[in-house]
Image: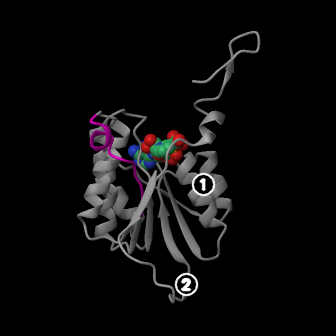
Amino acid sequence: MGSGTSGSRKKDVKLVRPVSVVVFGATGMIGGSVARTLSNSQKFKVTVVTRNPSNSLIRRLEKDGAEIRTADLNDPKSLVRVVHGADAMFLVTHYWEHLSKRSETQQGMNAVYAAIKCNIKHLVFYGAESCVCATGQRCGYMDAKAAIEEYIKGTGLPYTILRASFFYENFLSIFKPHNIGDNVFVIG
Ligand SMILES: NC(=O)c1ccc[n+]([C@@H]2O[C@H](COP(=O)([O-])OP(=O)(O)OC[C@H]3O[C@@H](n4cnc5c(N)ncnc54)[C@H](OP(=O)(O)O)[C@@H]3O)[C@@H](O)[C@H]2O)c1
């Protein structure tokens, strides 16, 4: 777990208009939570990104005031289109659809490139420890995020990196305990 930031926060900044934030992964657990929280604050104008705008989860965010935009982390041009005009970006990348460190790293770099191209003023990235550096063992989804972190640090973009571990919410979804008989519950 951990976090890091590229600079200190100014205490005397006065907001004259809501900060516009583009949020990736908004139909997912992490990005969805960020999008809902920001949408419920007057301080932010939220744009949420999905590949599938007919998703019912995204429609709920629209009711909360978020603007829905369609883009794919594999498609750099679509990213520039949706990031254009935003002040800040919340970026969470994904591994579990393709199980490829290389693909996740590329997707992250595509989004960071869009952030640079669109003059994003602050990038918040949902990263991870480098498993290779910490233990010598490879772990695709963590090493991809660590590679994206390194890329971000070299861009000069103002950033904050968040690193969290396993969420208990996973026990309500992917690791929901199931009864294998005689009230014996198995996780996973
Ligand atoms: N869950 C945990 O305990 C945990 C802990 C630490 C780190 N993480 C990491 O956090 C990341 C997200 O986890 P999560 O649990 O929030 O995932 P999730 O609920 O499965 O959500 C995945 C999100 O990624 C978006 N996405 C996937 N591929 C995309 C693409 N090509 N272009 C645009 N958007 C794409 C999906 O959007 P659409 O389908 O709407 O396009 C969806 O909103 C993962 O990389 C995971 O490794 C998770």
For label 1, the SS is helix
Q: Position of residue 179 (x, y in %)?
A: 71, 17
Task: Depth check: give the residue in front, 27 or 185.
Answer: 185
Magenta-drawn stretch contains 26: no
CA gap between label 2 and label 1 equals 23 Å
Work out whether residue 161 can be spotted: no
Q: Residue at x 32, y 44 (%)?
A: 144
Q: Residues within 10 Å of mark 1 (few under 14, many from 20)?
A: some
| Mark nearer the N terminus (2 vs 1) | 2
Q: Farthest front residue? A: 135
Magenta-drawn segment: 124-136
Query: Which type of secondary structure does the marked residue at label 2 adopt?
Result: loop
Which color scheme is applied? one colour
Question: Residue at position x 37%, y 72% from top?
Answer: 120
Is 124 located above or below residue 163 in the figure? below
Q: Is mark 2 within 8 Å of ligand 1?
A: no
**Vertical placement of residue 146 versus 156, above or below:** above
- What kind of residue is marked 2? Arg
- x and y, in percent, of residue 42 in the image: 64, 76
Residue 131, placed above or below residue 90: above
Residue at figure coordinates x 33%, y 71% from the top left: 118
Q: Is mark 1 within 8 Å of ligand 1?
A: no
At 66% from the left and 25% from the top, the residue drawn is 177
132 inside magenta stretch: yes
Q: Amino acid at mark 1?
A: Ser
- Is any part of residue 84 visible from this angle? yes
Q: Residue furthest top?
A: 182
Rendering coords of residue 7 (x, y %): 37, 75
Q: Position of 179 compared to 51: left or right?
A: right
Q: Which residue is mark 2?
A: 17
Measured from the top left, where is residue 40 in percent x and y? Answer: 67, 67
Write down the residue under mark 1: 33
